[in-house]
């Protein structure tokens, strides 16, 4: 079984944009309990974890228990070495419409 503490430590360097927990704390559910896995927008901030489908919360973080604020740590800034991903969308309803810009 892989060691879950290393990815968890990397994820917890950032505030969670979904549940808004501060850096140093694990994600929580709407009911206020510790989430069984970290929210995707949070672990996407860690470049080496972007290819992961999920990052589970280690058992020592208390999944399923009432959430408690962790110790405060300095939040890490996202790495400037990564390139942004461009996402686009085009739609054409009829044969007469053109996709070109006007």
Image (cartoon, rainbow, N blue to C red):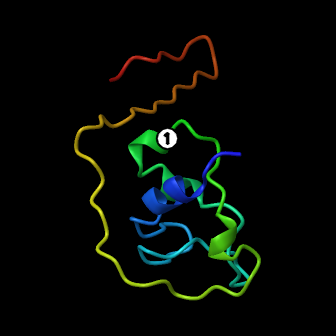
Residue furthest toward the top?
Answer: 95
Between 40 and 88, the residue placed more toward the observer is 40
Residue 43 in the image: x percent, y percent? 50, 53
Residue furthest toward the right?
Answer: 64
Quick check: 102 left or right of 62?
Answer: left
Q: Give the residue displayed 48% in from the left and 68% down from the top.
A: 16
Residue 90 in the image: x percent, y percent? 52, 25
Q: Which residue is mark 1?
A: 50
Kindly state the secondary structure of the residue where label 1 is placed: loop
Q: Give the residue displayed 51% in from the left and 53% down from the top.
A: 7
Q: Give the residue displayed 49% in from the left and 58% down from the top.
A: 42
Between 87 and 3, the residue placed more toward the observer is 3
In the depicted structure, whether residue 8 falls above or below residue 82? below
Between 5 and 41, the residue placed more toward the observer is 5
Quick check: 102 left or right of 70?
Answer: left
Q: Where, quadrant-wise, is the C terminus in this rendering?
A: top left
Residue 2 in the image: x percent, y percent? 65, 46
In the depicted structure, whether residue 65 falls above or below residue 2? below
CA neighbours of label 1 inside 10 A, class few (<14), some (14 to 19), many (20+): some
Q: Where, quadrant-wise, is the N terminus in this rendering?
A: top right
In the depicted structure, whether residue 101 falls above or below residue 82? above
Quick check: 9 left or right of 74?
Answer: right
Q: Give the residue displayed 33% in from the left and 37% down from the top.
A: 84
Dividing the picture into quarters, in which one does residue 92 lie?
A: top right
Residue furthest toward the left?
Answer: 80
Dividing the picture into quarters, in which one does residue 91 lie?
A: top right
């Amino acid at each position: 079984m892989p060691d879950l503490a290393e990815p968890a430590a990397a994820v917890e360097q950032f505030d969670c944009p979904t549940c808004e927990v501060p850096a140093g704390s694990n994600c929580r559910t709407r009911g206020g309990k510790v989430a069984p896995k970290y929210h995707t927008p949070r672990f996407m901030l860690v470049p080496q974890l972007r290819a992961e489908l999920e990052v589970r919360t280690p058992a020592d973080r208390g999944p399923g228990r009432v959430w408690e604020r962790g110790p405060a740590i300095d939040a890490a800034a996202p790495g400037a070495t990564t390139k942004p991903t461009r996402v686009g969308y085009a739609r054409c309803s009829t044969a007469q419409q053109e996709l070109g810009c006007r």
